Amino acid sequence: MRLNYLSATDALAKLQAGQITSEALVRDCLRRIEEREPDVRAWAAIDRDGALSAARNADKVRRNAAGEMRLLLGIPVGVKDTISTADLPTVYNSPIYRDHRPGSDAAIVDLLRSAGAIVLGKTETVEFAAHGRPAPTRNPCDPTRTPSGSSSGSAAAVADFMVPLAIGSQTGGSLIRPGSYCGCVGFKPTYGTVSTEGVKPFSVSLDTVGWYGRSVEDIALVARAFEIVEGALPRQRRLAAMRFGLCQTPYLIAPSPQCAVRSSRWDGGSPLQVQPSRTLNSALSLRRSPICRRPSCVEKGTSHFSTCFTLIQIMSRRASIGESSGSRTANLWPRKTRQQRCVRPSTAWRNATTPS
């Protein structure tokens, strides 16, 4: 049997027993990529020479060193191309970054190398792991079907026996869906468990780094290498001891009778009525009106969500820090950015500059 068919756990056991070498494992993985990459298209870049050199070094360390070895020593791994690597291009599947070479590894790549893993190459992704250019990757089980989300290159590479482990990321479902579609084990840790430093951000409150393997044991192996331990269960609290805040914004809808019935059965939780400030109300009103005065934008009814949301953030921050009413909120936004986004301060904008 060719060594690329081994799971990471089985390959590690054979490496530790001296039955195989890391160089032979990497060569079989590279041979599989040469055979199947034209059909699967899972890889954005391959570091053939660097991987073989690292594999020979791992074999040398394993032969000469005594005692406990690094947990992933000699195991090849793929890395999603939204994750920075100092020795490989990181282009995010975007022509804008065609020649981009980060100055350092992402934290997750540094952890992998510290554990002895060999970075075989970068796997394909949707542009910026968000929207735009789709990944060229095909489902290895059926090329006519989708491999699913933005980590599809990593999932397809593991499922097609090109590499035993691969790193991906998820904002919505980009780890678990490709694993399910392609037929490998995908793991999305709890948010914040693994550092996202060096990973191209899409949503800082949701982005999560995870990984793929061919078995649950492979997933646990990587978790041990990263020294991830199971956390304690959250402390349970009685509902009667909790307070619930209800912010009566302009969007508040009267509760239905069914909701009223359910709330009457609660275990004594005390509601807390919160009135929004004039600043927030003005910002919410601004959110509903177009702030771009270009005729084409007004005709389409666009509201420029990202711009409005940023304005709401600025106004809310001003209200929270209690800035003097004499300053202008517009000055908190760089002039160049306002011009690029064709923002024209409206009446609602000027009325929203004075916090309550």
Image (spheres, helix red, strand yellow):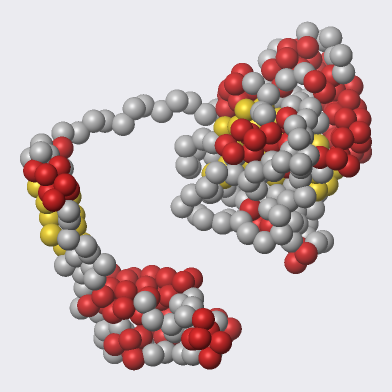
Which residue: 51% across, 35% down? 189
- In the rendered view, would you say 316 is above or below 101? below
Q: Residue 300: image x %, image y %?
A: 51, 81
Q: Give x and y (percent) for residue 86.
A: 76, 49
So how many labels did they put on this image? 0
Asked if residue 203 shows in the view, the reply is yes
Report the quarter where the N terminus lies: top right
Q: Is residue 279 left or right of residue 220?
A: left
Where residue 51 appears, as percent x and y from the top left, is 85, 35
On screen, residue 86 versus residue 29, left or right, reads left
- Residue 261, percent from left and from top: 11, 44
Does 169 appear above or below 211? Answer: below
**Is 258 on the left-hand or right-hand side of 141?**
left
Which residue is at a point 44% across and 84% down the rendered structure image?
Answer: 291
Give the quadrant of residue 102.
Answer: bottom right
The residue lying at 48 percent from left, 71 percent from top is 306
